[in-house]
Amino acid sequence: MIILKIIYLFLFSNIYSQIVNIEKFKTEKKAFEFFDKKFKDDLSESKIEKFLSEERAGKIKLVFGKYLASKEKDLNIIFSKCGFKLNSKECWYGALSEYSSHSKDHSTLLNMFKTLPCYSQKLTPSNFVNFCDHAVGHSMYAFYKHDLEKSVKGCKDFFPMSKNKKSCITGVLNHHFLVRECTLGDQRNGLKESYKCEGEMAYHCFKFKFNGCLEKIVGDNFAVDNVCQLKEELRNSCYKGMGASVYFKKFKNGLLSLKNVCSLNKASDMENCFLGFFDSMATDGVERKKLSNICNQLKNKKIYNFCLEKSN
């Protein structure tokens, strides 16, 4: 009886926690009110670090970054409070987007980008600097008042190097799909909507689209096999993006588990879905160490080899 009670309390507390998270972020105003109560004017680095390390939802951390920028106007202090760890990056994204949304001078904004604290820090792992470029993309989208085309052009103009430019555009796309509501109608038409996923950015585009839509697709019992009805190259990017979103959503069990989403009828679709998951997990220095455990559970030899390659 006692054991059953403990299990019940554990399950209920988890469900209750999820409900609270959903409710408190229905609007930005509610989120800010929640943070006011949680932090009670104590926005110390230690308290923020604890919050960012314990909070798993990237969107919540991004909204917190906006909240922090509404309280503090000095970018150096904002970045210092967000920190310079892997769990800090969403805080940067939100803070910079909030900061930039109030900027009226384009040249001043560009000069600010060049002196961002995340560029002057010796970040590890080395690819962490890509998150700084990504943060600039979130900023561009806020500065251009959610105008997608202008924001993408802003990234292309600001970054002469292809690698930086791509990371910046992923920030634009990330923010774009964060503020848009997903409808199943969009999914049944191959995820087509205002911004076409195409070219070299197609994979990243689909990845961020799925981040907000995967629950609705699977929850509606809509066959995942039918989502990416596109030409071969785009179809590959689409299913790869789907796999990546499974990782970003941290769905490890149940309806949206990796196995449930990526077990597709067509072999190439299934391979691309798993590859997207492995790619995303491999970019996270902490999670990458766990990848070999996943590899050992795979029976499909080709997918196993994909996994092993990414884990090294």
Image (cartoon, helix red, strand yellow):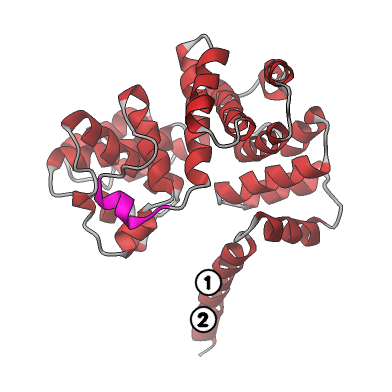
Q: Residues within 10 Å of mark 2 (few under 14, many from 20)?
A: few
- Between 306 and 150, the one lying in front of the other is 150
Which is more foreground, mark 2 or mark 1?
Answer: 1
Does dot 1 land on a helix, a strand or a loop?
Answer: helix
Q: Are marks 2 and 1 in contact (CB under 8 Å)?
A: no
Name the image quarter holding the C terminus: top left
Asked whether residue 180 is drawn in magenta, I would say no
Q: Residue furthest top?
A: 160
Residue at the spot of label 2: 8
Where is residue 79 drawn, in percent x and y?
74, 32
Residue 15, disc: 1
Instruction: Quote the CA–CA distance across marks 2 and 1.
Output: 11 Å
In the rendered image, residue 56, in percent from the top left (x then y), is placed at 56, 51
Residue 286 position (above or below residue 227): above
Answer whether residue 256 is visible to the viewer in this image.
no
The answer to whether 79 appears left or right of 191 in the picture is right
Q: Residue at x 59, y 28 (%)?
A: 140
Secondary element under disc 2, as helix, strand or loop, is helix
Task: Kindly give the residue lying farthest to the right in the view shown.
Answer: 41
Which residue range is magenta in the image?
A: 182-189
Percent coordinates x, y for residue 15 in the rendering? 52, 72
Q: Residue 259 or 189: which is nearer the viewer?
A: 189
Q: Determine the residue positioned at 54% across, 23% down.
A: 130
Question: Which quadrant of the structure image shows residue 230?
Answer: top left
> Residue type at mark 2?
Tyr
Seen at 56% across and 37% down, the residue is 146
